[in-house]
Structure formats: C-alpha cells, structure tokens
Image (tube, coloured by chain):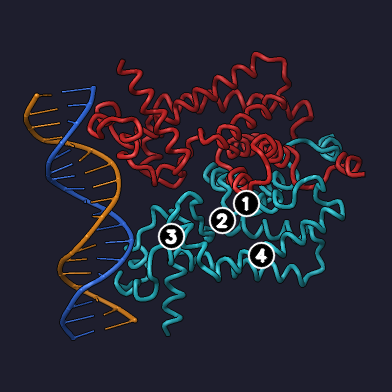
Chain colours: A cyan, B red, C orange, D blue
Amino acid sequence: MMRVREDAIIIAVNRLLAEKGFDLMTVDEVAAEVGIAKASLYKHFASKEALAAAAMVRVLEQALTVVKDEEASSASPMERLRAVARWALHMQLSQQMPTLPSQNSSLRAELMQHHRYLDLIMQVSEHLGDWIVKAQAMGHIDPQLPPDLVLYTIYARACDPVPAVLKSAGRFNDEQIVEWVLATCFGGLAARSSDARAAA
Amino acid sequence: MMRVREDAIIIAVNRLLAEKGFDLMTVDEVAAEVGIAKASLYKHFASKEALAAAAMVRVLEQALTVVKDEEASSASPMERLRAVARWALHMQLSQQMPTLPSQNSSLRAELMQHHRYLDLIMQVSEHLGDWIVKAQAMGHIDPQLPPDLVLYTIYARACDPVPAVLKSAGRFNDEQIVEWVLATCFGGLAARSSDARAAA
DNA sequence: GTCTATATAGCGATAGAC
DNA sequence: GTCTATCGCTATATAGAC
C-alpha cells in the first residue's frame, strides 16, 4: 500500500525531472501531480534530493534489466552497446529519462551517499565495461580509445541535447532521430570508406 | 568607463555560468565577484537573464572571431570544423564556456528576443553550415548525414559532459581529453579499417 | 499517513539617500 | 552610478491536529 503510493511518487518525479530538470522541478508540483499534500510527500522521502535519487534508482533498475536482457541474448558485445544506447535515447525522447545537473553539489553529495544508487551504477558500468573491452578485442570498437572514454560517451547519450533539438525542428520522427544520433555516436561525423561506396 | 565596468561584470558572469550554471548562479555572487553592490549591477543589466544573455553574446563574439580566422586560413572545411570544435572543448575545460539550460523557459524567452544574440548565432551557424556541406561534397564528412545533425552535434561539444568527467578522473591532461573527445565526435566509437592497421 | 497552516530562508528586484 | 536597506515572492521543509 505504502509501496504503491511511493511508486506513484517516483513516477511523477521521473516525469518532471525529464521535463524540467532538477532545479526547475518543485516539490509542490510533485505533490500536485501525485494528488497528495506536500507534507505527506515528506513522510515518504526526506528531501527533494531523495526524490531525485529514487527516480535515478528506478531508471537504473530499468537499465539493468535492459542490460541483463542483452546479456541473455546472442548479440555481439558491439550490438549490445548499441542496443543500450538506443534504449537510453528512446527513454530520453519519450520524456522518461530523468536528467540531473552534474553541477548541483547538494544533489551530488546525496547521490554519493546513496548505496543502492552507487551499487546500480557500478553494476551497469561493469557490464558495459566488459562489453567494451570485448568489442575492442573483436575489432568492432576502436581499440585505441580508452574504455572509460567509450563508457562515458555512451552514458552521455542519456542527456544528449541533440535529440531534443532535432525533435523540435520537426523534420524527423523519433525512430529516425535515434538512428541518426546512434550513427554519429558509433560511426562519427567523418566519412568512412563504406560511405563513399554508398554515396556512389 | 561604464564599458569597462560592464566588461568586468560579463567576465564574472561568464565564469560563474561555466562553473555553476544559470540556475545555481546568484546575482549576489556576481556582484560580490565584481566587487560592487547588487543594486549597481541592476543599473547595467535589467535582469539575471540579461546578464546571461550578455555572457552568451560575448562567447559568441569570440566564436565568430575563431570562425573568421579559420575562414581566412588555408584549412579545408573539415579541418575548420575540427578547429572550431577543438576551441569549444578547450573553452569548456578551462571553465570559460557559459552553459545555459535549454529547459529554462524564462531564459529562453529572453534570448529569443535578444537581437544581437540571434544575429551572432545565425552568423556562426551559416559559416559552419557552409563548411559542412562543402566537407560532405569533398567526402570528408559523411554525405548521408543531414547537415543540421552535423551542426547540432558540433554545437553540443560546447556542453558535452564527457570532458569534465574525464578530467575529474584525473588520468588525462586537457590536451589529451580534447583530442580523445574530438576523435569520438568525428571518428566515432566503432573501429575503422585504418584502426585495424594501426592496431596491428 | 494525511491534511492545513506556517516557519524559515534565499533570491530577484527595487526604493531612496548621496 | 554607487551604496544600504528592504520588499515581495517562492520554495524547501516542518508543526501539529485528526
């Protein structure tokens, strides 16, 4: 019962974080969206930062599910990385990816003490990191790039501003935007030899 | 005299925007950094949004200078694009690139009415857009990518979170970080045929 | 646990003297 | 134009009744 209510709260927080971000989201809005009083909210979560942390935990749990589904598939490490990046881009375009400002120190402090958050980040990172080194060994990911750089670059797709800008331009639908951004992320802006063949 | 004072204000705003972002920057901090009273600040700029707009105009003027320097050089369109992206990454890493939240509506509304800001954005975009189509015609930039996608992807390097994360990891210096991020932006994460040769 | 009502504080912006 | 002092508002968080 209490769990159901808290789920509703987290879903509302998630939506508002995706829509306006942490700084512009107000606790009053969250309470209004859930349909309860603000004081009741604070019976479930100690602070605004705790609300954001709970939303991040939720999306990381979803991410871990996606990761484990890929792990159980027959896809190659490179294909798995693309699949996770594709999922993150879809989440972002459908306003379901909460984005937190990396600059807000009070929020960072709370997240760094949130054990479940840290544990989930570590679990996801370990799976992705494993895929990255394997994909590099197979020659699918550039073996000269530091694995951390590859990992952060994929993580950054979750808060990439390009999809939203492309969407507001209105010339592409969500599927097309995701594929374009994936193409620039993994393929780069520069032409490849295969591009020359395709263009010819 | 008034111009000198306003320059000092804009420089302070620029630094604070780069450090904490618009929402966490307070007008009191700006006044303290400049060394004047807050009320005096408001004699020069009508609002906090106007302060941010002035900082954006300043950095866009610098960007336009970089663009025109490249235009006057003998570099190829592709090399010019790389050079501008490199400049933006250096500005970001040295805490001189003001980053504005795309979600803040009051700020967006003010910027969309700021003629000089819009004019500068347009000028820079026209130069970059010209280079992009030329680089595509020369086969240096993937001709299958929409030019707008390429433009936004390059603009996004100015607020890419990856450089700061790599820097905080502490394993690379600024020069190396810039080159790694440029490599992923233009070359992509996936291996190229030339990578296979280099790795062998 | 839920509510109404309120405490507390920070911030953007202004008044008014000099 | 600069200052001190303050207004007015909003937002986080809490008190206390039910």
Q: Chain of mark 3?
A: A
Question: Which mark is on residue B117?
Answer: none
Asked if marks 3 and 2 fall on the same chain, the answer is yes
Q: CA distance from mark 3 to mark 1?
A: 19 Å
Q: Which residue is mark 2?
A: A92
Residue flagged by tag 1: what amino acid is it?
Arg
Q: Is residue A94 above or below residue B107?
A: below
Q: Earlier in the sequence, mark 2 or mark 4?
A: 2
At label 4, the amino acid type is: Val
Kindly identify which residue carries mark 4.
Answer: A124
Spatial CA span between label 3 and label 4: 24 Å
Kindly identify which numbered label has been placed on residue A16.
Answer: 3
Residue at 55% over, 71% down: A116
Mark 4 is surrounded, within 10 Å at the Cα level, by few (under 14), some (14 to 19) or many (20 or more) other residues, namely some
Image check: A189 left or right of B98? right
Tag 2 and tag 1 share a subunit: yes
State the image coordinates of residue A4 (x, y, percent, origin top left): 45, 80
How far apart marks 3 and 2 lie (CA) works out to: 12 Å
Q: Residues within 10 Å of mark 3 (few under 14, many from 20)?
A: many
Image spot of residue A1 (x, y percent): 42, 85
> Residues under labels 2 and 4: Cα distance?
18 Å
**Callout 2: helix, strand or loop?**
helix
x then y, percent, for residue B187: 75, 39
Of circles 2 and 1, which is in front? Answer: 1
Q: Tell me the element at label 4.
A: helix
N-terminal-most mark, 3 or 2: 3
Please identify, in this view, whether the residue under mark 1 or under mark 4 is nearer the observer. Answer: 4
**Mark closer to the observer (2, 4):** 4
Residue in the picture at 72% in, 27% down? B78
Q: CA distance from mark 2 to mark 1?
A: 9 Å
